[in-house]
Amino acid sequence: MNLPYDALLVVSFGGPEGMADVMPFLENVLRGRNVPAERMRDVAKHYEMFDGVSPINEQNRRLIAALQEDLAVNGPRLPIYWGNRNWHPLLADTLKQMAADGIKNALAFVTSAYSSYSSCRQYLENIAEAQDHVGSSAPQIDKLRAFYNHPLFIESNVECLQAALDTIPEARRDSTQIAFTAHSIPQSMAENCQYEFQLQETSRLVASGANRDSWRLVYQSRSGPPTQPWLGPDILDHLKELKRSGATDVVIAPIGFVSDHMEVIYDLDYEARQLCDETGLNMARASTVGTHPLFVRMIRELVLERIDPDAPRRFLGTQGASHDVCPADSCLPRSESVTVKR
């Protein structure tokens, strides 16, 4: 079979892998943005708690290894490259290597399931900038669609949620509250994208798959000034409200993330757990999909549907499969919309 693509590019946020990387990484993240130095130092302290290492790069290595194994067995046999927005391997360096290897047309899998400026459109801009840096030999890159409602993404999250619920004593399991979390973004950014709606839909589908009725979508990791409206409620405020309402157990499921970013291990495994310990609220945290076999299989399906026009474009819910090419005006940010990710 003559394939229209000759490589797969995994595109991600990137993260430091030692103390010496932290400040250069944060400078990359915040370049061109009016973010106070104090905010940068505060975020740096979070990394210091983990010896300057974000888990995201190692998790991407494991995801790529699992995907390579799947493609080697089941096809299509595409070489896999990896490029990050903010830390090595940087996109421009990766595209330069792809050009040197003779790659002409590649598909890009971005490690975000949802549509917003920072989780989708900005990655397209990053790819375009990397192509400009490489020049005329740069490969053509086509991004795979948003996959928030793909059956295998939902099913892998259902299994992660159920595993966390199974740690709750059986007598209290039915009354356990579920908090689905995602990275908050400015309200002004959310107004011009489907981010909030897609997260609600994913939460609904995952809760339904686990036969759970009591759940809520909440947000974490806001970084803007107090005067700027961001999506809420915040996870910590929600946990306090659950405790006041008499809840005894909560499962936090970070469905807004596909791997354990610093936001997950700091905001949830440290801050949220600390609050739960202090208030006596029993907390379990569901895993992110990471290298779940169903998630890996989903990536292969997304590749196949772009290669073969007759391949099914699977989805759950009522919204259909996301488009392959974003409209020119989709997810445009406003000048005041700044997200400081970790």
Image (cartoon, rainbow, N blue to C red):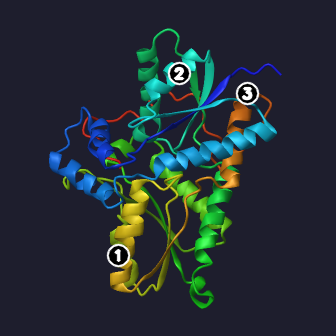
> Which of the 4 image quadrants contains residue 166?
bottom right
**Mark 3 belongs to which amino acid?**
Ile
Measured in 3D between alpha carbons, the distance from the residue under mark 1 to the one under mark 2, in whole angstroms, is: 44 Å
**Dot 1 surroundings within 10 Å: few (below 14), some, or many (20 or more)?**
some
**Mark 1 belongs to which amino acid?**
Gln
Residue 284 seen in the current view: yes
Q: Quadrant of the N terminus?
A: top right
> Which of the 4 image quadrants contains residue 325?
top right
Taking the spot 32% from the left edge, 43% from the top edge, the residue there is: 21
Q: Are marks 1 and 2 in contact (CB under 8 Å)?
A: no
Q: Is mark 1 on a helix, strand or loop?
A: helix
Q: Earlier in the sequence, mark 2 or mark 3?
A: 2
**Dot 3 surroundings within 10 Å: few (below 14), some, or many (20 or more)?**
some
Residue 307: image tag: 3
Q: Nearer the viewer, residue 89 or 328?
A: 89
**Mark 2 belongs to which amino acid?**
Gln
Q: Where is residue 170 in the image (x, y as percent from the top left)?
A: 63, 87
Please say if 31 is above or below 101.
below
**Dot 2 surroundings within 10 Å: few (below 14), some, or many (20 or more)?**
some
Q: Nearer the viewer, residue 53 or 318?
A: 53
Front tag of 2 and 3: 2
Q: Judge from the rendering whether residue 14 lies leftward or rightward of residue 43; answer left or right.
A: right
Taking the spot 41% from the left edge, 17% from the top edge, the residue there is: 133
Q: Where is residue 143 in the image (x, y as percent from the top left)?
A: 57, 30
The residue carrying mark 1 is 274
The residue carrying mark 2 is 97
Front tag of 1 and 3: 1
